[in-house]
Image: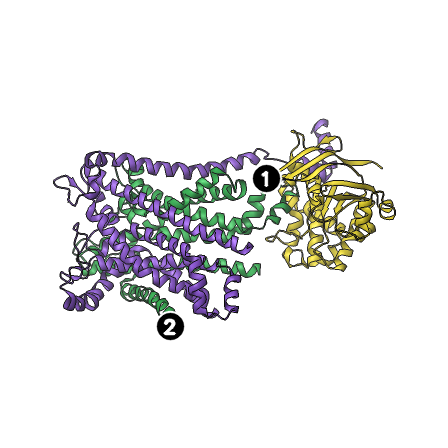
Amino acid sequence: MLVIVVLLTSLALIPLISILSYIIYKGAPAINLDFFTKLPAAVGETGGGIGNSIVGTFVLILIASCVGLPVGIMAAIYLNEYMPKGMYSSTIRFVIDVLLGIPSVVIGIFAYLAFVKPIGHFSAWSGGLALAIIMIPIVTRSTEEILRLTPNSMREGSYALGISKWRTILHIVLPYSIKGIVTGIMLGIARVAGETAPLLLTAFGNHFWNTSISEPIASLPAQIFEYAKSPFDDWIQKAWGAAFVLIMLVLLINIAARSLTRSRLKNVD
Amino acid sequence: MNSHAQLQTEVQQNASLQQKIYQKRRFRWMDHGFKWLTFSFGCIILIMFVWIILELTNESKQSISKFGLGFIFSQDWNPVKGEFGALPFIYGTIVSSLIAIIIAAPISIGIALFLNEMAPKWLKQPVAFMIELLAAIPSILYGLWGLFVMVPFIRDWLQKPISKYLGGFPLFSGAPIGLGMLTAGILLAIMIIPIITALARDVIRVVPTLQKEGYLALGATKWEVIWKIILPFARPGILGACILGLGRALGETMAVTMVIGNRAEIKASLFAPGHSMAAVIANEFTEATDDIYLSSLIEIGLLLFLVTFVLNAGARFLIWTVAKGSKGGVKG
Amino acid sequence: MAQRMRTENLKAWYGMNQILKGITMDIEKNAITAIIGPSGCGKSTFIRCLNRMHEVNEGTRVEGKVWFEDQDIYAQSIDPVELRSRIGMVFQKPNPFPTMSIFENVAAGLRLHGIRRTSELNDAVEESLQMAGLWNEVKDRLQHPGVSLSGGQQQRLCIARALAVKPEILLMDEPASALDPVSTGHIEDLAIKLKHQVTIVIVTHNLHQAARISDRTAFFLSGDLIEYDNTKDMFISPSDKRTNDYISGRFG
């Protein structure tokens, strides 16, 4: 029995090791200064870089965070601090469950219909909003869970000093749970950083530096997709290089997020 | 400074700290203000959700009214002629996801049992962490790896030997090109293993310790405990976990589109290229030139939405029954 | 003696359960009033009604009147938040704010009430810690986390924190029940010292504690006030048989 189970576990870990090592093996050689700073080369030429995609991914994450984080965190505060029970809150929790399960490409369709079609062209902000919609349920869920772990005695201690509820939330509850909330935020960001399908329908892609958020914008995942489909070896190598950058970004955020909560758990013990 | 102001400052200076506190209750409006602020952010989530449903149903109306139920059962997908039937995509989505779940379910349950019941402590954390990392890898990177590493591997080491000996069976017929239904299914399996594992671990964790220990005390082996206590107790929850994994597989886009071959055909062979609902949206959406084409793609999106909605609701219900059962078990 | 608070037919519910069944009693100024009774008799709920803390939990309800000076604290015009800065509370389990230092714990109430001048805060923190008998133990490590203190010290920190906002009444909900005998002694001495400045209402399941420190004692049973008298009289010659049974240890 033990043998079977160990075998199954290692079977699942082989792809992880294979993916990571391939991306490092194929991607690392593509990395140089030009790769980070230059625009993509024209068809048939070698050289160039994916600087605009890296910047684009950060711009998209920034837009998504500016919209998604306030909504997610504030909604979670309402759910846990003001109305843990009741119709309204259970409805929101149900909707969050559903949103977590919706394929991201469907969110992409929605963002296209709501933010691209009425304007008439692809844009960075429509892509950012699509990512925000993916981010909101993740952040709401994790924030609410963390707030629920905050001991009630702390809130009562604060009320007993004549401190109002909103100040208690802002000055007592949030500082206590901030590490856990940040962990949730970082995991949400890591998740949307690699989203591709919704961006194809909204931010589209761009081979140049983006000057305005109402223009289409390049992003790492969309660039990887474009290059991976291409017949040119140089572009395929660039795809691996971009994959290397993306996976480093995502893994670093993940590891940082997890070490944050782990150190916090130590404090509590 | 006039005498009145002077008086005022003196009074203020004399005022005790206590009075100061009572006077200083500022921002009283925030008591309700903050509540309503957070409430309204909750509303944004609800509005967003309703808006998503409205947009999807509204924009797929054209396709629904033109093709009706035939949309789901028709095999013809010909944008040039204006004929749109979604069956090849539905078929591809279902078959690739089923392959995925058949592979992923036993592996995930095995891992969950290993991590919860058997693994030594020092091994638990790193393995759990690595499985979680598997979930963190973006799907586009699975696609890239699938296309350049897995496709050749499966072609040379799986498909070629099989077609050599079993090529006569329709299931394994056709040229071994690597791209296709089987590869997509295997790739999806890798992607949903961490999801099913995490949920299955949660479910297995709530199996009451009392029951397990009672059975062990009767002289049962660990193996018997797993089969007679843990798995029966956790069955609905594990089923729910698998359904959630299935839901994720159905909606997976980038990884699938890179390895499935993107051909809108229905073939009996697992080696043949196919297509999927999510993949066709990602590939053709921005190229859809006329309204009915776009509307058809949106209807596919709506179908995906509905299916994942139903699967999620069902799965959550199953997991919830286990959690509830364990509470009752502890009391009883 | 002057009276500080008075409850009139005070009833309280938790969900469907009625916890208090109509309590009418006076609380005297600058005295220690002890509330005793077996667990579940409603004594904690009673003092939580005195500063409107009962209502912060979901599914709770209060009826009746509570007079504080000449105001009904359950009247529409009363702001419970302000009320609680005048009627402080110390809880069964010490609950210093875990993210804050010793200094910040005591200053928290003042800061959040808008007092920002450093000198003023320093003075107030020192004064409160002095009053709580903690100053000499912590004056050299005010910046250490509040949770680094021992349980007894944490509870006195919580008392200092409550005193910092200058309450007129201090409600103590079994403040020593989680502490060792030495720390319990500290808290009892402290209560006796403090009563000249603040009115104290203390809930305790420890009869000896009530006998040692309180001026007046109220005996609660199943949500009713059975007997309320000077502590001495009550412990020497209780007028109700149930009180007699309880203090002689026959139940509870």
| Left or right relative to C127: residue B188 | left
x and y percentages locating residue C70 in the rendered image: 75, 30
Q: Nearer the viewer, residue A120 or B10?
A: A120
Chain assigned yellow: C
Q: Nearer the viewer, residue B158 or A255?
A: B158
Toward which corner of the image does residue A128 lie, by quadrant? top left
Q: Chain of mark 2?
A: A
What residue type is disc 2 on?
Val
| Left or right relative to C226: residue B210 | left
Could you tell me which residue is drawn at 53 percent across and 69 percent down? B217
Secondary structure, mark 2, is helix
Secondary structure, mark 1, is loop
Could you tell me which residue is drawn at 32 percent across and 60 percent down? B104
Badge number at residue C59: 1
Q: Is residue A166 above or below residue B316?
A: above
Q: Is residue B180 above or below residue A172?
A: below
What residue type is disc 1 on?
Gly
x and y percentages locating residue B273 in the rendered image: 18, 56
Chain A image colour: green
Chain assigned purple: B
Q: Does any portion of residue B131 appear in the rendered image?
A: yes
Q: Residue furthest bottom?
A: A3
Mark 2 touches mark 1? (CB < 8 Å): no
Q: Chain of mark 1?
A: C
x and y percentages locating residue B259 in the rendered image: 22, 57
Q: Kindly identify which residue carries mark 2.
A: A3
